[in-house]
Image (cartoon, rainbow, N blue to C red):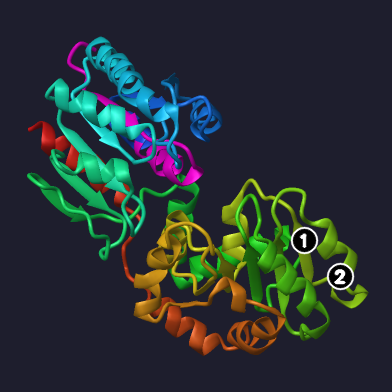
Amino acid sequence: MENKKSILLAGGGTAGHVNPLLAAARCLRDKGWQVTIVGTREGKEAELVPAAGFELNTIPRIPLPRRPSLQFFTIPTRMRSTVRKIESLIREKKVDIVIGFGGYVSTPAYLAARSMNVPLIIHEQNARPGLANRLGARWAKVVSLTFPSTKLQAKRGKTVCIGLPLRPEIATLAKERQDPQGLKRERQKALESFDLDPKLPTLLVTGGSLGALSLNQAMQAALEELPENVQVIHLTGKGKDAPVRQLLPVGLQSRYRILDYLVDMERALAASDLVVCRSGAGTVAEMTALQLPAIYVPLPIGNGEQRLNAADAVKSGGALIIDNARFDANFVTEKVIPLLLAPGRRAEMARSLPKEGTDAVEKLAKIAEEVLK
């Protein structure tokens, strides 16, 4: 046990940061590494990391204030204290390598790795890199990217595009879908679980766990115009299903499934022929790995990263993109439904998607092994 390789993983805030971290954690643990995870009590990691069977070592959340305030002057002191805490953890766990996935948690981990001369590997999930990863890239041994178009380079180390470490359920489904019979089998099984007809094309509409009001409203307004030869799985977001249910015509009830949230999201993806969704990095990476045609409606707020995340898939011809303000009932009936009813075009879109594969997590583990040599 004394010679067991030890690795520290840092990242958190959103599920988008935590899911690839956990995929890497499982893979590295299975390969014999001792895995230590650092996160905050406030981020999604506080829920997801323990649920995955890992201990979460918590540090304070140190966000940069959006407006000038007295809090800004406390950042250096709080950051030094947090860096020292991680340095102590590195010594205690005899950490050989640090891998960071971005977010607030990563900055002190990167600084601790540098101060203790521990090799650093970065994984950047988004097409537009965050502040923490831009900082860490200055001294990282390896910067690994999800998207080829991401403008982030290791200043002294090497930069590689590996894709996104996928959740095991998605990686397994993606491998099944590579075979036409496997795709058909998984689709039929999933549709039966929703009590839907495998003979009809299926649209999945999802705005993520919180939902997307614009997607919900557009679908509500289009309900009366949906043809009889399509079916829909609509994930509205937690607590946002009632308005759609109230407007659902009786004639649609056998073909329109409304859920506010789905724990096993892979089941809805297996059932789908076309997806309407936001374009968070994790979502885009999963659609690409599954070779699922998608219509992306980027979140209209933020720094524009969602539009950039979708850029490679759209450029390939495997996806469409529409501004949030333009996604309405007319777009649903004039663009979404005709595409759903065009199996030839959907198949062509699926074939056009980048073939990034499902082995990003294995590639990341291999990078860690090579850095130690």
Q: Are marks 1 and 2 in contact (CB under 8 Å)?
A: yes
Q: Position of residue 349 (x, y in %)?
A: 44, 81
The image quarter containing residue 333 is bottom right
Q: Which residue is mark 2?
A: 248
134 lies left or right of 168 = left
332 lies left or right of 299 = right
Compared with 85, 110 (above or below) is below
Element type at marker 2? loop
58 lies left or right of 188 = left
Q: Position of residue 171 (x, y in %)?
A: 43, 52
The image quarter containing residue 312 is bottom left
The image quadrant where one finds the C terminus is top left
Residue 14 included in the magenta stretch of the image: yes
Q: CA distance from mark 1 to mark 2?
A: 9 Å
Element type at marker 1? strand
Q: Which residue is mark 1?
A: 258
Residue 137's tag is none
CA neighbours of label 2 inside 10 A, class few (<14), some (14 to 19), many (20+) = some
Compared with 302, 342 (above or below) is below
What is the span of residues highlighted in magenta in the rendered image?
Answer: 1-24
The image quadrant where one finds the N terminus is top left
Q: Position of residue 258 (x, y in %)?
A: 77, 61
